[in-house]
Image (cartoon, helix red, strand yellow):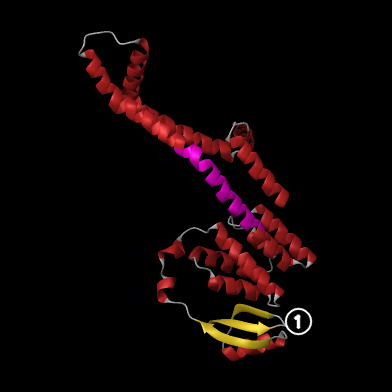
């Protein structure tokens, strides 16, 4: 069904805008008037072929996609639309095919008799907090307010994550630069320095001999080092996926002098806001 953008005046005299799909303009007009709205403007929304076949449609779901959809659903529910109509509208308006697929599956699950929260729990793009808040909203009849609050919570989390990445960017850049300079010295600079000093026929100082030995070790066993790094990263991912292991790693991260305090403040802010 085509999608229509509307501008109406509600019973309180306020102006509302939104979108809804319908079989025809007359059907949309009848529905909006049955809800007590005075129609100010109604036009059909056109979707360009370029936007339909954009490569961005097939990218994974972002947090901001879920955030905007929840905000739209809350606004439409507050405006008097039904949940299925709101879900169908956000499905049509979603920019990415993956997000449209999620809303379509949720709408079909609700039509089969499942609750909104249970349908959302089947998809990983919705966090546990959002799912539980939705369940509370369904039970208390405040689903529109809960969805809008969930959207604001996700927005705050996204902004907090952005601030956290910004705060950690400088230490990470310094660390990567230091590692890069060290690898360059061990692989390229020190072997040439060793050949230059060996031409004098003198014994190297202890510190220089240690650096040369380290360089020879790295250049000889670097494949083993790459394999060991891959194994270590894989082990870290597996251990972090295990709840007791994740708790241990998080405890270690919180005790790191600089980044630990940043993690503690970020987590405390998220907890307090929730």
In this rendering, is residue 105 above or below 47?
Answer: above
Q: Which residues are magenta?
A: 153-173
Direction bottom: furthest residue: 26
Reply yes or no: does residue 168 show up in magenta: yes
Q: Quadrant of the N terminus?
A: bottom right
In-image side of 6 versus 57 (left or right): right
Query: Which element type, helix, strand or loop, lies under badge 1?
Result: loop
In-image side of 74 versus 229 (left or right): right
Location of residue 262 (image quadrant): top right
In this rendering, is residue 128 above or below 264?
Answer: below
Q: Position of residue 139 (x, y in %)?
A: 78, 64
Residue situated in front as seen by the camera: 65 or 122: 65
Reply yes or no: does residue 51 show up in magenta: no
Residue situated in front as seen by the camera: 155 or 167: 167
Q: Position of residue 209 (x, y in %)?
A: 33, 13
Direction left: furthest residue: 199
Direction right: furthest residue: 140
Report the residue at 75% width, 63% height from top: 137
Q: Position of residue 69 (x, y in %)?
A: 60, 66
In this rendering, is residue 37 above or below 134?
Answer: below
Report the residue at 53% width, 41% height from top: 168
Location of residue 76 (image quadrant): bottom right
User: Residue tagged by mark 1?
Assistant: 12
Q: Answer yes or no: is residue 274 visible.
A: no
């Amino acid at each position: 069904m085509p999608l229509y953008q509307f501008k109406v005046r509600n019973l309180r005299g306020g102006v509302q805008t939104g979108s809804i799909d319908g079989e025809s303009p007359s059907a949309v007009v009848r529905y909006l008037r049955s809800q007590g709205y005075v129609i100010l403007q109604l036009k059909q929304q056109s979707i360009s072929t370029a936007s339909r076949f954009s490569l961005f449609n097939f990218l994974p779901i972002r947090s901001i996609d879920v955030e905007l959809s929840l905000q739209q659903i809350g606004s439409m529910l507050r405006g008097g639309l039904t949940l299925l109509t709101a879900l169908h509208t956000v499905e049509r308006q979603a920019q990415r095919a993956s997000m449209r697929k999620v809303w379509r599956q949720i709408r079909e699950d609700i039509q089969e008799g499942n609750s909104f929260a249970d349908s959302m729990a089947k998809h990983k793009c919705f966090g546990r907090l959002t799912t539980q808040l939705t369940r509370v909203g369904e039970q208390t009849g405040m689903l529109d307010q809960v969805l809008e609050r969930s959207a604001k919570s996700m927005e705050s989390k996204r902004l907090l994550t952005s601030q956290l990445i910004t705060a950690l960017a400088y230490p990470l850049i310094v660390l990567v630069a230091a590692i890069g300079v060290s690898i360059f010295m061990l692989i390229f600079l020190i072997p040439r320095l060793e050949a230059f000093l060996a031409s004098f026929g003198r014994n190297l100082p202890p510190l220089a001999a240690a650096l040369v030995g380290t360089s020879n070790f790295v250049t000889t066993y670097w494949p083993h080092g790459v394999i060991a790094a891959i194994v270590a990263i894989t082990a870290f991912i597996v251990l972090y996926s295990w709840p007791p292991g994740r708790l241990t790693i998080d405890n270690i991260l919180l005790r790191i002098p600089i980044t630990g305090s940043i993690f503690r403040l970020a987590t405390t802010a998220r907890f307090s806001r929730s």
